[in-house]
Image: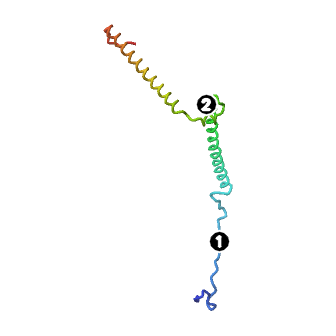
Amino acid sequence: MRHSDGEHDSSQSPPRTVRPVVVALPVDYHPIVTMDDAWNVLKWVLAALAAGFIGQFGKSFALHLIDRKRRIRRVGETGDPVHRAQQPISPLASAEESAQREQAKIEKKRAKAQAKIEKKRIKEKTGDDSPVA
């Protein structure tokens, strides 16, 4: 019986002790997974993780080399890719390029329309309904 202060009553039986449980395994017992098997699995897992690590950084390094090669190819007269990258693009220059592209488109459309008119004129002269090559 317990007293209010948490001590055992000496008149009662002593407190119980915990006894370990012993399990008798059969003589021919073979575990499903041995330590050797566990180490082999662990080695393969570590090898896969190492391969992934190397592969990821290899990919990043390859992309870095490709980007570097592209920057070197773009280098103009300055010879310095950093200097070239820091040069701002002039809005006037981009506007001129845009205007040149628009002018080229207009010229192409005019030439196409002129060729179409010429083709119709030839077709009307010959009176042939088959397409002209």
Residue 103 lies, in percent from the top left, at 45, 23
Residue 35 lies, in percent from the top left, at 68, 57
Q: Is residue 15 above or below residue 74?
A: below
Q: Marks 1 and 2, how far apart in space?
A: 77 Å
Nearer the observer, 69 or 132: 69
Looking at numbered disc 2 in the image, what kind of residue is underneath it?
A: Arg
Label 1 sits on residue: 22
Looking at numbered disc 1 in the image, what kind of residue is underneath it?
A: Val
Nearer the observer, 113 or 102: 102
Q: Is residue 132 above or below residue 6?
A: above
Q: Quadrant of residue 75?
A: top right
Residue at left offset 61%, top offset 38%: 63
- Tag 1 and tag 2, C-beta contact below 8 Å: no
Residue at left offset 57%, top offset 35%: 88
Label 2 sits on residue: 74
Image-based side of 15 in relation to 96, left or right: right
**Residue furthest bottom as drawn:** 11
The quarter of the rendered structure image containing the C terminus is top left
Image-based side of 124 in relation to 45, left or right: left
Q: Residues within 10 Å of mark 2 (few under 14, many from 20)?
A: some
Q: Secondary structure at mark 2?
A: helix
